[in-house]
Amino acid sequence: MRHPVVMGNWKLNGSKEMVTDLIKGLNAELAGVEGVDVAIAPPVMFLGLAEELLSDSKIILGSQNVDVNANGAFTGDISPVMLKEFGATHIIIGHSERREYHNESDEFVAKKFGFLKEHGLTPVFCIGESDAQNEAGETEAVCNRQVDAVINALGVDALNGAIIAYEPIWAIGTGKAATAEDAQRIHAAIRAHIAEKSEEVAKNVVIQYGGSVKPENAAAYFAQPDIDGALVGGAALDAASFAAIAKAAAEAKKA
Ligand code: 13P
């Protein structure tokens, strides 16, 4: 049985004060909530502070990016070894904002994926199509290509224990979320594509939906059989909203 994972991607938002308030709020809101893994990815600057604030918490610490080198002359980059030292385990890679603004290719993202696995970290591997690709009916082809970059480089078993986040780019930060039915169809297609290589891996891999997930629409996603949680942007910056989404996942996925 797959366990749902709800993760907050804080993107480039926060301050010491905001991080402190938000994590304290989440600790209070989520105390005693069972049946869902909850993770947060604050900006890397705040991982030390977040680690302290989460010392007695079940909330998992994550981060938003990683480099393909562990240390050395790589100015400005982020080491998986350092992420680990701060207790961050779930690392977002392949987000469309990095693919777009930092020209990250499928192959580069696959390299990051492999490097995270090498270091015992969990990739939260984002895929998804643009508005134009969606309009052109290319959604499945784009998702398959992005997933295949990892499978071709590392083998299908690399997806074991990893998380895939399907995030249609046109739904990110727009309020224009995919319908639960459309998202389910794509999730099922992604899973079927992986099943061509390994039914076992396909059955077990967590596939989150991301893109304008809010407390109001969360339950509809989690009611779908192939949607195993959410990667949440804007609504993750509010403790009550993010907790409501996590609770909806726990509720919907109860055996
Ligand atoms: P929003 O929830 O703000 O649409 O962002 C989604 C996202 O990009 C999460 O990684």
Image: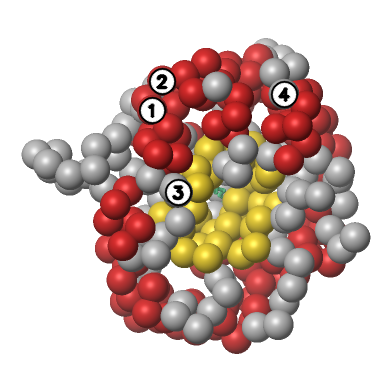
Q: Earlier in the sequence, mark 3 or mark 2?
A: 2
Q: Quadrant of the C terminus?
A: bottom right
Measured in 3D between alpha carbons, the distance from the residue under mark 4 to the one under mark 3, in whole angstroms, is 22 Å
Asked whether the beta carbons under mark 1 and mark 3 sit within 8 Å of each other, the answer is no
Q: Amino acid at mark 2?
A: Glu
* Mark whose residue sits in front, 3 or 2: 3
Measured in 3D between alpha carbons, the distance from the residue under mark 3 to the one under mark 2, in whole angstroms, is 19 Å
Query: Which of the 4 quarters of the picture holds residue 19?
Result: bottom left
Q: Amino acid at mark 1?
A: Lys
Asked whether the beta carbons under mark 3 and mark 2 sit within 8 Å of each other, the answer is no
Q: Secondary structure at mark 3?
A: loop
* Mark whose residue sits in front, 1 or 4: 4
Q: Secondary structure at mark 4?
A: loop
Q: Residues within 10 Å of mark 3 (few under 14, many from 20)?
A: many
Q: Secondary structure at mark 1?
A: helix
The residue pinned by badge 4 equals 198
The residue pinned by badge 1 equals 111
User: Where does the image place residue 152, in percent across and percent down from the top left?
Assistant: 52, 16
Asked whether the beta carbons under mark 2 and mark 1 sit within 8 Å of each other, the answer is yes
**Residue 243 visible in the snapshot:** yes
* Mark whose residue sits in front, 2 or 1: 1
User: Where does the image place residue 213, in percent across and percent down from the top left?
Assistant: 67, 53
Measured in 3D between alpha carbons, the distance from the residue under mark 1 to the one under mark 3, in whole angstroms, is 14 Å
Q: Is mark 2 within 8 Å of ligand 1?
A: no
Q: Earlier in the sequence, mark 4 or mark 3?
A: 3
The residue pinned by badge 2 equals 107
Q: Amino acid at mark 4?
A: Ser
Q: Residue at x 60, y 86 (%)?
A: 28
Measured in 3D between alpha carbons, the distance from the residue under mark 4 to the one under mark 2, in whole angstroms, is 21 Å
